Amino acid sequence: MSDTLRLLLALLELGPRLKDLLGDKWPPYGDELQELAGRAGKGEDPTKLRQSLDLLLVRLLAEAPATELVEHVMEDKAAPVTETVTRRGRVTPLVVPDIVQPTTDEATGVVTIPVFYGTDRDRGDDTPARYFGGARGTPSFGIAQVSVPTRDRDLGELTSPSWWRLEFSANPEKHVILKTVGALGRDAFVTSLKDSLAAADLHDVLIFVHGYNVTFEDAARRAGQLAVDLKFAGRTLLYSWASAADTRKYTVDESTIDWSRDHFEAFLQLALGEIGAGKVHVIAHSMGNRAVINTLERVASWQLPAGAAKLGQIIFAAPDIDRDRFVQLAAKFKGCASRVTLYASSRDVALLASKFVHGYPRAGEAGDALTVVDGVDTIDASLVDTSLVGLRHSYFGEKRSILNDMFNLIVQQLAPDLRFDLQAAGDTLRKYWSYRA
């Protein structure tokens, strides 16, 4: 049974409880659930069924009395069970080798990636999964080690133990695992990263900035997986802002990403000016794009040291930012990087939820709201997965990912018209690219 059907059946079972909670607001939801059940019974295409179910979930999550119950069902029935290898008790201080670099276990194909992180999260306990929490803290730095299997894992798949596969503990040969987290002072962080980059095959760095509703653990795992799937030969950095990692706290995350902007700006300036990088590439997803785009607005005023790195590829993946605001800011950072790319989607559930909350189109939307602006390559990626670390119930089983195109963009340095998966669309005044069917 697919995860979509599991979730649909679970919601149908909860119908009476949801009816009691929502009262007069329940009838349209009940009718839609029954309609979805009928469509499922007729064997409708799972992708279309999932889209309709996702839209229904977005609306249910806006109903305060039902939010906790719906989230519980989503976690239990649709999300993978998170069982991370952790260490119990206090941990010994981080011992940093002379050169921190990726390693590969030739027997298993498991790659261990050092993720050099900056964060403004508060400190948690000493287990990797809870080393940082979801509240605001002071900026700190360190190295997280992430193991990534390279065999029997689809491109872009952030594998975790799944209850429906009877997996109850993490297996390095199957799952992406956050193995260790260790803090470093700023000076030690810069020195370690600089030495590691000097020993790398490529002297570029890739910074990943996650979106809404993401833990530090999932952000670090995704950063490691990105490095492996993109075959990135430089060093991988993560900026993990203090997302509450709670679907009920969307507005809290909105406030925090604005608060984090100065911290991210300092982190980006460190990467450009202090570690000996050649180019700095940035991938931002969903709400994380706000910190990036608001930082780029001020890039022209920076006073970087002589010999500082250049901004390479700036990638806005399904940006959750007001479309009109994006257009305003794009005019200010035009020409600041080698190339700026916007991946838009009409299927990204986080964006649908954001539009529902704000009432205005988001820059990451496709369709009639597609954002096309001078200086930015816009790609309609509705046919593939743009979710990255989005809402956990989205895009299960998706086989195509924007990572295929990101590889050609970052590693091969190819313009859109030279990338096989893309085809030109629009007209001379409003040109963009879309994925081939």
Image (cartoon, rainbow, N blue to C red):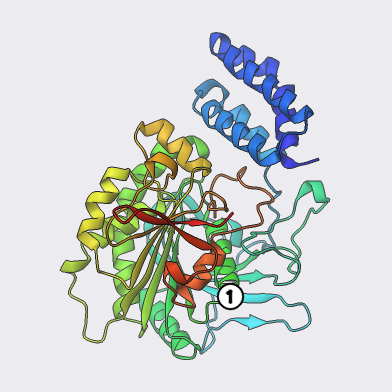
- The N terminus - image quarter: top right
Indicate the quadrant where residue 417 lies: bottom left
345 in relation to 266, above or below:
above
Q: Which percent across, then down, holds residue 359?
A: 36, 31
Screen quadrant of the C terminus: bottom right
Front-lying residue, 225 or 266:
225
Say left or right for 302 vs 34. Answer: left
Left or right side of 422 for 180: right
Image coordinates of residue 285 in percent, x first then y, are 45, 55
Residue 48, relative to residue 115: is it above or below?
above
For label 1, count other residues whose C-alpha is less than 10 Å away and answer few (under 14), some (14-19) or many (20+).
many
Residue 393 in picture, x, y percent from top left: 62, 42
Q: Nearer the viewer, residue 239 or 374?
A: 374
Q: Which residue is mark 1?
A: 113
Answer with the quarter of the image where residue 113 lies.
Answer: bottom right
Q: Amino acid at mark 1?
A: Ile
| Rendered image quadrant of residue 51 | top right
Is 265 situated left or right of 81 in this image? left
Residue at the (78%, 47%) spot, across then down: 163
Q: Is residue 248 above or below residue 297?
A: above
User: Helix, strand, or loop for circle 1?
Assistant: strand
- Residue 128 vs residue 243, the one in the foreground: 243
Where does the image place residue 94, in percent across and percent down from the top left? 54, 76
Furthest residue to the right? 166
